[in-house]
Amino acid sequence: MDKRSSVSICLQSMDKLGKPEISRIIEMAWEDRTPFEAIEQQFGLDEKSVIQLMRAEMKPSSFKMWRKRMGGRKTKHRGLRKDEIDRFSSPKTY
């Protein structure tokens, strides 16, 4: 799959999302301990798609702040997390 078709698929996936889903994705993306893999599992958007969505939905200054904040977070990528952390929500949430 080339880069153009990948971007096209991402945009099609985002078009199917309603406002509540977009709001939840933005909320999850801002959360320090929610990995991108959890967003992909729930909504079918990979990290690049989440970045595109955040860029489209946020003011430029907010997007830059988010990107800077997410820059070195080990918790945003399941592969960089400690092995004993195998969940993406707090056990106290439910």
Image (cartoon, helix red, strand yellow):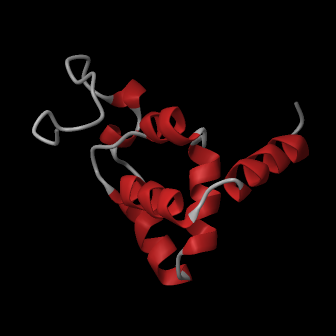
Q: State the residue in front, 27 or 72.
A: 27
- Residue 83 drawn above or below residue 80: above
Q: State the residue in front, 50 or 12.
A: 12
- Residue 91 drawn above or below residue 15: above
Q: Residue furthest left?
A: 92
Q: Position of residue 44 (x, y in %)?
A: 60, 38
Position of 8 with respect to 42 (left or right) is: right
Position of 9 with respect to 78 (left or right) is: right
The quadrant of the rendering that contains the C terminus is top left
Instruction: Determine the residue positioned at 78% across, 51% down.
Output: 12
- Can you tell which quarter of the image residue 3 is in? top right
Q: How many marks overall?
A: 0
Q: Position of residue 73 (x, y in %)?
A: 34, 46
- Residue 86 drawn above or below residue 94: above
Instruction: Determine the residue positioned at 60% across, 69% down.
Output: 55
- Can you tell which quarter of the image residue 65 is in? bottom left
Instruction: Determine the residue positioned at 16% across, 42% down.
Output: 93
Q: Residue furthest top?
A: 83
Instruction: Determine the residue positioned at 57% across, 73% down.
Output: 57
The quadrant of the rendering that contains the N terminus is top right
- Residue 49 drawn above or below residue 37: below
Q: Position of residue 86 (x, y in %)?
A: 27, 21
- Can you tell which quarter of the image residue 24 is in? bottom left
